[in-house]
Image (tube, rainbow, N blue to C red):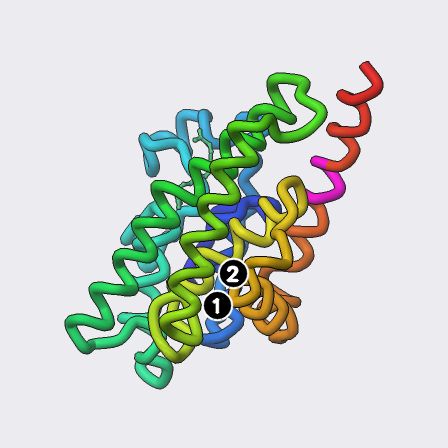
Amino acid sequence: MTIKIYSHPTSPAGRAVFMLTEILNLKYEFIEVSVMAGDTRKPEYLEKNPNHTIPMIEDDGYILIDSHAILTYLVEKYGAKQAQLYPKDLQLRSTVLQRLFFEASTISAAFLSIFLEIAMNNGPGPNAAQLEKSNDVYNILDKYLSKSKFVAADHLTIADLACISTISTMANVSPIDAKYEKLTAWYKSLSNEEWFKKGNLPGLTAISQYLKSVMEKNSKA
Ligand SMILES: N[C@@H](CCC(=O)N[C@@H](CS)C(=O)NCC(=O)O)C(=O)O
């Protein structure tokens, strides 16, 4: 039975999952769910996901929400040939989990705050505190990347997918300073990958254009 993925191309969390499906060459049925249009608050969606978020997957009747949990599930179930994406080694796996939790708590919060400032608060862009927070995130990732080639290990893991989807989105509204050399190089190298171009770029381009146009409108108001 084909996995169903409920998401929207612009969702950073959803794009992390789409990049993984490209890497695993996983076939799925895409069900477009728009937060903006209120789809996640409809009774039939809330029945499956009371947390009213995207992405969500349905695998032969099993429902799972949260991109980080979905990434681990998909590699465990469908990624036998690419098991290094979620390493079995306890310490490596724990570092991957720590980076996933860092994304879920700190990186996502930094971006959400900026997104709300622009989309809901009519801000012309991130305010000083939000810029400071995003730069703190860049600095932390730069430090991680000076210890290993990728954010959690010397090879690609699902932590990179979780981080690059949000970082690539946030970088459009809070640019990454060139002084974060490791982070800049990591971003550049991942963005050359086919799975990035197919799984991340289309939605990233759409949300970037949206944010740019709202920022322009807000700065004229
Ligand atoms: N930790 C969750 C966050 C998901 C999330 O916040 N998704 C947003 C869209 S990018 C959403 O569904 N927002 C609607 C809501 O929270 O009601 C994940 O990684 O899946």
Q: Image point 38% across, 42% down: which residue? A: 106
* Separation of marks 2 and 1 at Cα, in angstroms: 5 Å
Q: Quadrant of residue 87?
A: bottom left
Q: Residue at x 59, y 58 (%)?
A: 179
Side of 59 relative to 188 (left or right): left
- Across and down, in percent, residue 57 comes to 39, 52
User: Quick one: which residue is furthest to the left in this view?
Assistant: 90
Q: Is residue 66 among what the camera can see?
A: yes
The residue identified by callout 2 is 18
Q: Nearer the viewer, residue 157 or 177?
A: 177
Mark 1 highlights which residue?
21
x and y percent of residue 177 in the render? 62, 52
Type of amino acid under label 2: Phe
The amino acid marked with disc number 1 is: Thr
Is residue 198 on the magenta stretch?
no
Q: Is 210 in the magenta?
A: yes
Specify whether residue 29 is in view.
no
SS for tag 1? helix
State the residue lying farthest toward the bottom: 81
Give the structural element (helix, strand or loop) at label 2. helix
Vertical position of residue 65 compared to residue 2: above or below: above
Magenta region? 207-211
Q: Return the residue nearer the eye: 1 or 192.
A: 192
The residue closer to the viewer here, 146 or 101, is 146
* Residue pictured at 31% horizontal, 81% vertical: 80
Q: Position of residue 28 (x, y in %)?
A: 49, 63
- Report if the CB atoms under discs 2 and 1 are less than 8 Å apart: yes
From what the image shows, is residue 71 above or below residue 90? above
Crowd rating for badge 2 (residues with CA inside 10 Å; few <14, some 14–19, many 20+) = many
